[in-house]
Image: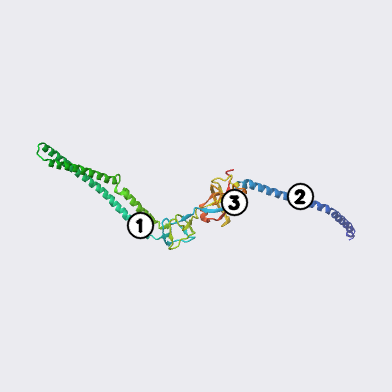
Amino acid sequence: MNGPDILAPAGSARAAESAAETAAEKPAERAERLKRVRKRAFAALGGTVAFVALTSLGWWYFVSRNTVTTDDAYVDALVASISPQVSGTIADVRVRDTQFVHRGDVLVSLDPADAQLAVAQTRAAYEQALRRVTGYFATADAGDADVSARAADLKRAELDYTRRAHLRQQNAVSDEQMSTARNALDDARAGLAAAQHQVTAQRAMIKGTEAGNNPEVLAAKAAYDKAVLDLSRTTIRAPLDGVVSQSTAQLGEHLNVGDPLMMVVPIDDMHVNANLKESQLKYVRRGQPATLTSDLYGSGVVFHGRVEGLGGGTGAAFAVIPAQNATGNWIKVVQRLPVRIALDPKELAQHPLRVGLSMDAAIDVSSAR
């Protein structure tokens, strides 16, 4: 029982000494620990900066320097402008704005009454010309027969005159009879010459032709075909598949040739005009791949296309009032050139676009580098 009581003061003394040593060593350990923490923090910061720098350098070298981008890009298409090719009054309007139409669908019908009358009139003129030219051929054949008859009359008159001339040498005929025979011979010669000239004139009208391809018949046929064509044009049809836009057609409205009626936009055949700065065009070439996103679908839908070509001039050069740079207060402005990018028809079918929508375009120019 006395053992523990005797040992207790000695253990307490050693514990006190250890606590004193620990208290004496705490400031040094704390300083060392803070130093190690700072080293690790600076090392982590340096590593992060190096990683960001290397990542940025790698991104620039492998991606950014091989890509030109712009948000100045818009959807465009070869829009069909619908206008009448003949004048007339609108009798029927089959479509409205936003309606999808197929090629050949009827858009607008004009009153066909005048065109139908023109067809009937020109058809009658064509058939009359055909009959008239057929008559030319019959007249020419009759003229040949008349020439043959005149030639026989001339031969008979020559024989009669020759016979009377022999009899005159024998004083068997009078001077009056000789004069009558001579006049008959002259008349027969003149009649043959007249018949020959008439046949020549008639043959000239049908020379080298038949009744179906005579110039008179062809002219009448052309007028008839034109009337038939004008009648068909009273029905205005869609020239391609697309969406009707900007329709102004109204029932009863009188139209002249060329008056604008509507637009048909081919939504399955569109392209993008990306307006790149002149400083971005150094490596842009035809056939280079491009990726595009639209504000309509967001970044989740990516369109793929290829560069079809570069525009022939900047927008300022083709403006209605072009810029006059030869002035004293000229300020240089970076110009933009439209680059046409064709879109994938399959992607357009899945995600239709409309003319004028904004796009973000990125062109891979690594092939040119």
- Residue 180 lies, with reference to residue 348, above or below; the image says above
- Which mark's residue is nearer the viewer, 3 or 1? 1
| Mark before the other along the chain sequence, 1 or 2 | 2
Tell me the residue at 34%/52% (across/down).
221
Residue 210 vs residue 182, the one in the foreground: 182
Number of marks in picture: 3
| Mark before the other along the chain sequence, 3 or 1 | 3
Residue 224 vs residue 59, the one in the foreground: 224
In the picture of the structure, the residue carrying the numbered disc 3 is: 70
| Mark before the other along the chain sequence, 3 or 2 | 2
* One can see residue 107 in this view: no
Tell me the residue at 80%/51% (across/down).
32
In the picture of the structure, the residue carrying the numbered disc 1 is: 118
Distance between the Cα atoms at labels 1 and 2? 100 Å
Instruction: Describe residue 364's horizontal placement relative to residue 86 as left or right.
Output: right
Tell me the residue at 25%/44% (across/down).
197
* Secondary-structure class at tag 3: strand
Q: Work out which quarter of the rendered image holds the C terminus and state it.
A: top right
Q: Position of residue 135 (x, y in %)?
A: 26, 50
Residue 103 vs residue 318, the one in the foreground: 318
In the picture of the structure, the residue carrying the numbered disc 2 is: 39
* Secondary-structure class at tag 2: helix
The answer to whether the residue labelled 3 contacts the one labelled 1, judged by CB atoms less than 8 Å apart, is no
Distance between the Cα atoms at labels 3 and 2? 44 Å
